[in-house]
Image (cartoon, rainbow, N blue to C red):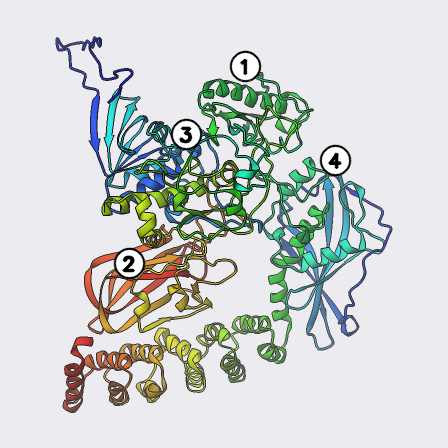
Amino acid sequence: MKKLIDLTDRSSDQWVQMGSTEKPTLIREKKISSDVVVVGGGMAGICAAVSAARNGIKVVLVQDRAVLGGNASSEIRVIVHGVTKLKSGLPERETGILEEILLLNRFCNEQHSFTVWDHVLYDFVTRESNITLMMNTQAVRSNTKDSKIESVLCWQLSTETLITLLAEQFIDCSGDGLMGATSGALYRTGREGKAEFNEKYAPDEPDGWQMGATILLSSKDMGKPMPFKAPPFTIKFDAEKTHPDRRIIPFVEGFWWVEIGSKGDIIGDAEIDRHRLMGYAYGVWDYVKNSGDFPEADNFALDWVGSLPGRRESRRFIGDYILSEPDQLSFKDFEDAVAFGGWPLDEHNPGGIENLSQPPSFWHEHFDKIYQIPFRSLYSKNISNLLFAGRNISQTHVSLSSSRVMGTCATMGQAVGTAAALCVKKEITPRELTQNHITELQEQLLRDDAFIPQRPANDTQNIANTADKIYASSTLSGDVKLLLDGVSRDENGEIHHWKSEGLDSELTFEWNDPIMLSSIEIKCDTNVKKNIMMLKNTRENEAYTTIIPPELLKSLSLELLVDGEWKNYETKDDNQRRLIKFNFDTIKISGFRIKMYETYGSENVKLFEVRCYK
Amino acid sequence: MINSLKITLSLLLPLWFLISFQTKSMAVKNINHKIVLKHPGEDIPVEVTLVEVQDSDGLPIAYFTDVESVICLEQVCKIVSVRIYWNNIGVYQKYELENGATLEKYEDDLFDPEDYKKLHTILANIDSPYKEVYLDEILTVVDEHTEDIDAVSGATALELDEKDTVPGAALTCFTLWHWVNGDIVSIIKNKTGESVSNKQLQQFLVDENETYFYIAIAELQKRKNYSKEFIDTIIKRGLKDDFLLRTAFNYLKGASVENYLYAAETLFFKGSREQKLTTTRSLINTDYKVSKGYLNNFSTQFSKLDYQEVSLLLELMQDKNPNSKVVIENVLPLLSGDFIIARRAYWFLNNETLTTKQEREIKCFYKKHKDKL
């Protein structure tokens, strides 16, 4: 392995341990083998690692910071947007692993604390026994042979350790994509010209502009006048010259438009840009406090100011397909669709706050429904075992302006994690998975509560639809038969649910011929048409709920019909998930009955899917 | 809050086109009710006078109240008194302004005739976005973006589709919508229930609009009136409208045991599938003691029922009428029918005390189907 600097050379290290004559040998090198390495512990990386681990393979998750969450972490504090606002004003939540995380956060972090959120994510990852989590560790170089990554060299800051990770599949969810880049994977940066992909919002000619990074801040009301003196590195905010879209009110949660873009090496300039961004952030706050235009800010003081800019764009790898603006705007139907998005085409201006005359975002278009993301955009064209998820996927700059938001990145993460697991099990490449097993990937994702628009599940292993009798104790809306139609939400105005009239309620499946069964899986309602991500300032409204979704099923039990008698198998009194699983030793039954007792507030219970497996 | 710095304007122009108030000529009596209401634009509950308009028979035919619409921005607030009308089940009908009064938008723009119509439409929409809008969202937007107050994008700024608001008058829409569609609706329903006679309640029970049925049931429960006359009417309605069965049984379970059982039997035998299932569930859950003879009679229907009905009725028999010879005799023929019903019948019979002949029958069934049991 080529090493420009031998980081393992400790020959000059003069460690003296007081109270001992020993001079310990400092071994600072490790080699770890696993099935999959995921680099990047943001929302995409977490979902990739967890989905791969749950699909039965060993995963190492590498995160270069002390906390998980990436842009969503307490270090940066960007909202986990996804399809949070369609033209209707309502969201179309992602479900899947992200849904589990957001619900867990609701249960553990009602106070919406960012530092608690960090540890909700930590809890979520570390409870997976198949994941080895490496914090404070950066993947700095790939070792590639015959267009295949064999290992990745990592530096763990906190332990001064050089770690070599060996695996079958590598997933780059790091945003900047250093691991992928050093493997030789093709990528591009900047803006495509209009002609290349027929993008109406692209510039006429290609250029290097990348959307900028932002430093956020927040403030709080101290109940008394709070003077503010700007630090020397402050850069004055020229309010006279700014485009009116740079709104100061509400000022409490900071300004997403305090952003610096780049038309060159946005990574290489990061530290210079960070310093300037801090200057701009304080400059805007100075304007709020000292311009005299905002007397309502008199009692406010800074409560938190970011030091780590949240980056929107840098490398975009090249896959077998490059997702582009026309695909999104035309809602292109992909055979290999595995993820989805729907955030507006929110392209920020070239230069950010240094381009004051233009609006901070062009908000080119909002979507009236969600678009698909193909699997071919999620693996490398030229490195055979490299997958990616997040803002670094194979797409154009304009496409990125919508798909970069973290909820959408999470759907990609779940897709690549699941795909990597299948690749390991089948000993194939992601490309071969696309060519020969894409249905299997999609079905697994749908089973795991991911959602793929316009792609109903049709899992041949699921035997729920072989039941001879399916009936409910009551029906207020929908139909029990819709629990088998493979669509796990009401979609585009069509109903795909069954809803009880009141509680308690029962749902019964029975067979003429007894069956062998070992698993029953239910998808219940959490109202995907309301946002539940963590916000700095929450309020109940048509598109957001501040509480645990009242629709969520809280208490239920499963009864199995064995020898003519209904036997209680298990009661769950404290369910916290949309996807509810009952797993048991294989048993011969003639039917099963789901008894539902309580939701977190709704009078009725709504289900979208019931599956069962031998 | 919105009541700060009120300045009453002289109200000059009568602009509102009146929707004809058809019941006006029939009204003979107005009754004033002092009520206290919470309004999301007010810090503390507000007392208002709700006027109940009754006809010559004492039937409430409408309600109205006068509220203040406050147009309050920065240092200037204006108050316009608005009279809101509802029908007798709390459905908003119209609003009227004081003679000569007019509504205004931000920055002294007057409402034009289309704005008045639109406001009426907004108030009539019980699912208006104003249901979940916050006062400070409106104030923030108005404060900062005077030129575009209802179409601002941003993290917490108010965004409303133009069809859902009168641009420039979000605060008026918000204030009035909550007066019109707030707690007062349920208060009106209660008042109507309290005011009507038993004879009028009978009419409510058969009214096509089910809201009257719900008001009547709630009122009858309050009056503890479970007379046969009402029960017969409720049974008739329950036979006609499945979706009212739960409410009906909620009432019936408070009746005397005789009347409850009479209603249950009638609904089961005269009703279709939903009536049968709802009745059977009610009988499973009732605390009343139910005689064997009564339940035996239900078992005569097994051959006419589908699987879910059979299964539930057998559950009732297992629970409240075990080892009934009549039931067993009525269940035995099911062994030779549709298999899944037969299997359910078999497992029921397997737990019953049977005659030797009956034992033979179920053993025979077992031998024949043991792989499918």
> Which element carries disc 4, helix, strand or loop?
loop
Q: Is residue B54 above or below residue A127?
A: below
Q: Nearer the viewer, mark 4 or mark 3?
A: 3
Residue at image point 31% right, 52% down:
A437
Q: In the rendered structure, which amino acid carries the disc numbered 1?
A: Phe
The amino acid type, in three-letter code, at marker 2 is: Thr
Tag shown at residue A398 = none
Q: Position of residue B216 (x, y in %)?
A: 57, 73
Give the chain letter at badge 4. Answer: B
Chain hosting mark 2: A
Residue B90, given in percent of the width and then of the height, sits at 64, 64
- Specify the label residue B75 is tagged with: 4
Work out how far the residue at label 1 is from the one at label 3, CA to CA, in angstroms: 27 Å
Do pointers 1 and 4 mark residues of a single chain? no
Asked if badge 2 and badge 1 are on a common chain, one would say yes
**Residue mark closest to the camera, 4 vs 2:** 2
Q: Residue at x 32, y 61 (%)?
A: A611
The residue where tag 2 is placed is A571
Q: Which residue is mark 3?
A: A176
Q: Is residue A409 left or right of residue B29?
A: left
Looking at the image, which is closer to me, B50 or B88? B88
Disc 3, SS: loop
Q: Chain of mark 3?
A: A
**Badge number at residue A233:** 1
Q: Amino acid at mark 3?
A: Asp
Q: Indicate which label's residue lies in the foreground, 2 or 3.
A: 3
Label 4, residues with CA under 10 Å away: few <14, some 14-19, many ≥20? few
